[in-house]
Amino acid sequence: MRSTRFMTVAAAAVAVALGMTACSSSAAETTNGSTAESGSSAFPATIEHALGTTTIEAKPTRVATVAWANQEVPLALGVVPVGMAAATFGDDDGNGILPWVEEKLAELGGETPVLFDETDGIDFEAVSDTNPDVILAAYSGLTQEDYDTLSAIAPVVAYPEAPWATTWRDSITYNSMGLGMADEGQELIASIEQEIADQVAAHPDLAGKSTMFLTHVDTADLSQVSFYTANDTRAAFFADLGLSTPKSVADASTGDDYSKKVSAERVDVFDDVEIIVTYGDQSLVDELKADPLLSQMPAVANGAIVFLDGSGPMGTAANPTPLAISWVLSDYVDLLAEAAAGKS
């Protein structure tokens, strides 16, 4: 599953995105207004985030990452972490490393990082044993207690606003600042945006299609419709792909919740949804079409459904991360186009 290279979603989208994340040749500005210059001259660096203020005294040489996907930023910028979280789903060969991460490690010729087992939460002892200079966690669900414990080991870059709500752009922006590579981070964002736009341009029929992402559907209980709000990175990525957020989903996206539920008896609220993305297989689609209530959703009736293997790489990569986007993009956009044409 390899994608081709891409460009900016649209001129306006690029202007907004780069306006949010752009940096000058000497500094990158966070959403909270703090700045950090690139390279060794960038230090000491101060980064403000949702859990506090982090000061990094010198350019890190030993980088550890915790939680989901943060390792992809240093790897994309040519830095091999000393430790990172083991993949617990989406791992195609059971070695704890996602395929796009494995490919990048091979490309860099780096030693495989220590893999932290986060099945029961952050393994603080294992992180400490890697003797890191910085801990990257811009995309994570760290609690204040987690953050404080990690901060006793090394400076920690946490999420800018809310747990598990950091966009792929902000993940790159914040984590690259922690590396003293703010300028390189912005270049990475621009290259990914170019890839996306190339793919979107190849599928003009997708432009503006209202799309929602259903969470894992329990076919044993279809009495509720569970979905990701616009706060979730999976749903937010639709805008990058030229799709739109249905008003029904936008109206439900108040607060910080990244998922919500609606009774199936109120399924008509989703009459404005043209495409559905979810985890499952054809049997799930058949179940939705057979259900007396959910079958009334226009997207279900029209067969406009993208179903992803939630335990495999494709489903995992639907949550956009710096390396996964390029790895999955072409296939993902093709599936969306097929669904829009009613070919699910």
Image: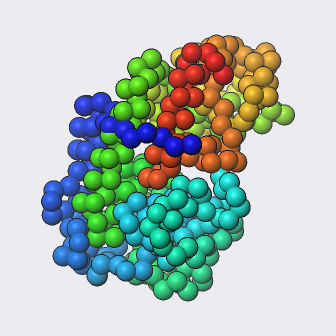
Against 275, residue 257 (above or below) is below
The quadrant of the image that shows the N terminus is top right
Q: How many marks?
A: 0
Q: Write down the quadrant of residue 99 in the picture.
A: bottom right
Viewport quadrant of the C terminus: top right
Using the image as rendered, state which of residue 214 and residue 189 is in the foreground.
189
Residue 197 pos. (x, y %): 35, 33
**Residue 198 percent location from the top left of the image:** 36, 33
Name the residue: 15% across, 63% down.
26
Query: Considering depth in this image, is 251 or 137 the residue closer to the camera?
Result: 137
Coloured how?
rainbow
Q: Is residue 138 left or right of residue 117?
A: left
Is any part of residue 265 visible from this angle?
A: no
* Image spot of residue 274 (x, y percent): 55, 18
Residue at 60% of width from left, 83% of height from top?
125
Residue 73: which quarter of the image?
Answer: bottom left
Give 244 or 195, whichever is nearer the viewer.
195
**Left or right, residue 217 beside residue 144:** right
